[in-house]
Image (cartoon, coloured by chain):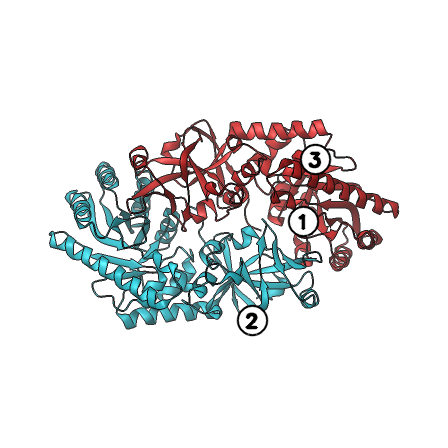
Chain colours: A cyan, B red
Amino acid sequence: MTDLTELETPCLLLDLDRLERNLQRMREHCRSKGAQLRPHLKTAKSIDVARLAAAGAPMAVTVSTLQEADHFARAGYRDLLLATPVVPTKLARAARIMAETGADLILATDSAGVAAAAARFAQTQGIRLSLVIEVDCGEHRSGLPAGDVAAIVSLARTIHASPHLRLRGIMTHAGHSYGTDDVAAVAGIARAECGAAAAVATAIRGAGLPCEIVSVGSTPTVLHAPSFAGITEVRCGIYMFWDLSQASRHICGIDDIAVSVLASVISHSQAAPALILDAGALALSKDLGAQRYMPEAGYGLVCDPATATPLPGLAVATVHQEHGTVPIRDLAWFERLPVGSVVRVLPNHACITCAAYEAYTVVRGEQTVATWPRVNGW
Amino acid sequence: MTDLTELETPCLLLDLDRLERNLQRMREHCRSKGAQLRPHLKTAKSIDVARLAAAGAPMAVTVSTLQEADHFARAGYRDLLLATPVVPTKLARAARIMAETGADLILATDSAGVAAAAARFAQTQGIRLSLVIEVDCGEHRSGLPAGDVAAIVSLARTIHASPHLRLRGIMTHAGHSYGTDDVAAVAGIARAECGAAAAVATAIRGAGLPCEIVSVGSTPTVLHAPSFAGITEVRCGIYMFWDLSQASRHICGIDDIAVSVLASVISHSQAAPALILDAGALALSKDLGAQRYMPEAGYGLVCDPATATPLPGLAVATVHQEHGTVPIRDLAWFERLPVGSVVRVLPNHACITCAAYEAYTVVRGEQTVATWPRVNGW
C-alpha cells in the first residue's frame, strides 16, 4: 500500500468503491428490467474489471478490437461479440483466437461482400464463423438501415446459405443518444432502438431464418429504455467508470466517476495566472465530449487528491503534449497547491483517457491496493 | 516484406523516404545557421528514428518523460535534457536512471522549492544533479518570466549554492509560435525567443554564475529564426514526421508528412452518406490542432494507400472510439473504395496520434521494411 502523494505522476487511478457501486447498480438495473447484460469491455480493457462486472458468474462480453478479443479469450471468456464491422484482413487472426482458445468470437458486418469473403475464408480453413448483422437504428454510422428490411433479410439469407457461416442475429447501437442531455429524449431514442431491433428480428425470423441474438446498446439507452421486449441482450461499458461526458448529459453524477488522473503541479505561471500540471494531451486525451453541455469541464475537472471532489472553478483549460494549464482567478491557489503537490483530474471521456495507460492504480480512499493491467492497441 | 493491403488495420505507417528527407533537411538547416541541434524525441519516441536523426553521430537529445529518459539512456544516449519541469516525486527515478546508465539527465525547473528539494535529495543520495532554469519567453506555460531577471538570477544562485546541484543553464520554449500561420510572424517570435534567452544568459553570467546551456525550441522558431546568436542549442521534434497541424501553418508541405494511419473501410453508410473507417478516436486521436487554419483537415486527410496523396474532399469528419466517419458527396467513392479496401490517413497532430501505437510499420513505397518500437507512457 502506497500513499497517493508518493506515486509518480501522471498516473491513472481507479476508485474501487465507486467502481463496485457502479457495477452493482447496472447489474440491478438490468435485472429489474429483465435485460441480459453483455458488458462492453472497450472502456475498461481489464480482466480484473470484467470479473468484477460479472460478479463471479461466467459472462458473455462485448469487445471493440481483436486485441481485446484475444486478451479476454485467453483469460477464459468463451462468448465474445466484436461489435465493430469486420473486414477480410482480420479473419485470419479471429480464426486463430478461436482455434487457440475455444472461444466463440461473434463477428459483425453489414456487407454482403464481407459475408461472402468470410464464407470463402471459413471454407478454406474448414471452420464455421458466427456473424451478426449490424443494423442502423438512427446513428448513421455503420449498419444497414433498420427500415431497409429487404436488404437485411437478403444479407441474412446470404449468411445462412453458407454452411461455413452461422447467422446468429442482429446488433444495433443507438450512439445518437449522446446528442441530447434530456433523459426523456434518451428514453424516446431507446424506445425507437429497441423497436427497430425487435422489428428487424421479427422480419428475419419471418423469412424462416434464425435470429437468436437481438443486441442493443449505448449506456444512456440501456439505462432509460422503457422496455426491452423482443431484445435478448444489452451492451454498455462506460457505466463501469463514468466520466464528465456522461455527467454532462445527466447520465451519471460527478461523484460516480471512478477513474481519474493523478497529476502533479509542476509550475505556477504568474503570467497566466495558472497552475501547470504534468497531465496534458497524452495523459488526459484531447477529447472534449462534455463541452456541449458542460463547457466548464475543459479537458478535466481538477479535484482534491484525497476525496476526488472538484476544487471550485479549477479545470484543465489548455493542453500541450505533457502540460495541462489550469487557469486560476484567485492567487491563493498558489499557496494551497504548491509546486510538487498533487491533484486528481476527472476525465472528460474515460474511454479515451484510459487508453494512454498500461495499467490502473487501484485505490480505496487514499491507499493503493492493486495494479490492474489494461490491453491497449489493436 | 509485406504488401500494405495485407496488413491488419489500424496500423501506424512510417514512410522511410520522407523521414530521411525531413531529417536531412533539418540537419542542413541547423548547420547552415550554425545551430547545435538537440532533437526532441517526444514525437518519435523511437531509438531507430533517433539514430537516423543523428546521422550516426553521438548526439545530445531532448525527452519529455522519465520513461523516454530511461529508454534512451539504456540505449546509450549520455546527454539527455528532460524538458518538462521536474517535481520531487520524480527525483528517485531520475537518479536511478543516471546511476544505472551513466547518463547525465539534465532536469528543468522554475521553482526554488523544487531546487531546494533536489539539493536535499541529492545530498542524501550522495549524488549531483544537473539543472536548467526554465524561462518563459511569451508562451505563458511553465518558466519564470524572461523579464523577471531578479527571480531568475536568484534561482540560479540557489542552485549554484548547493554542492549537490550543477547549474547548467537555461531553456525556453516558444510554443506561442503555433498561434499564427504567417511565417513572418514566426520569425518575429523566434527573434524575441532568442533575444530573451540570450539576455537571461548574459544576466546569469554577469552575476558570476555558469550558464553553459542556452536552449531554445519549437520547430517553427528553429526553422524561421533570423539568427541564433547567443544560443547554444535548439530543440525540435515534429520536423521528423510533420503533420497537418504544421502544414496548416505553412511550416511543412502535406507531402512531407512521414507518418500515416493505414485504415480499412469497414462500412458504407448510405444514410450519411459516408465511408466508415476502423480508425477512430483511439487510432487517430481527438486532436484538432490544424482546425484553425485548415478546417477541412478534420481528424485527418484520407489518402491513396500507395502514394499517400490526399483523395480530393475526403477527411475524417467525426470519430467514435473505433470508427472514423468520412462524409462523401459523390457515391462513386463507394465503388472506388469498397468495404475491405484500405486508405492512409495523414494525422492532424502526429505527436498525439503516434502515442496510440506500440510500433511503427516502416515502409518504402508500398512495401514494409521494418518494425520499430516506440516507448509510450510515463
Q: Amino acid at mark 3?
A: Ala
Q: CA separation, marks 1 and 2?
A: 33 Å
Nearer to us in this view, A46 or B281: B281
Contact (Cβ within 8 Å) of mark 1 with mark 2: no
Residue A311 in which image quadrant? bottom right
Residue B328 in which image quadrant? top left
Reply above or below: A285 against B335: below
Residue B313: x %, y % from top left: 40, 37
Residue identifier under label 3: B225
Q: Is residue A11 left or right of residue A232?
A: right
Q: Are marks 3 and 1 on the same chain?
A: yes
Q: Secondary structure at mark 2?
A: loop
Residue identifier under label 1: B139
Q: What chain letter is assigned to the residue under label 2?
A: A
Q: Is residue B30 left or right of residue A250?
A: right
Residue A305 visible at all: no
Residue B172 in which image quadrant? top right
Residue identifier under label 2: A307
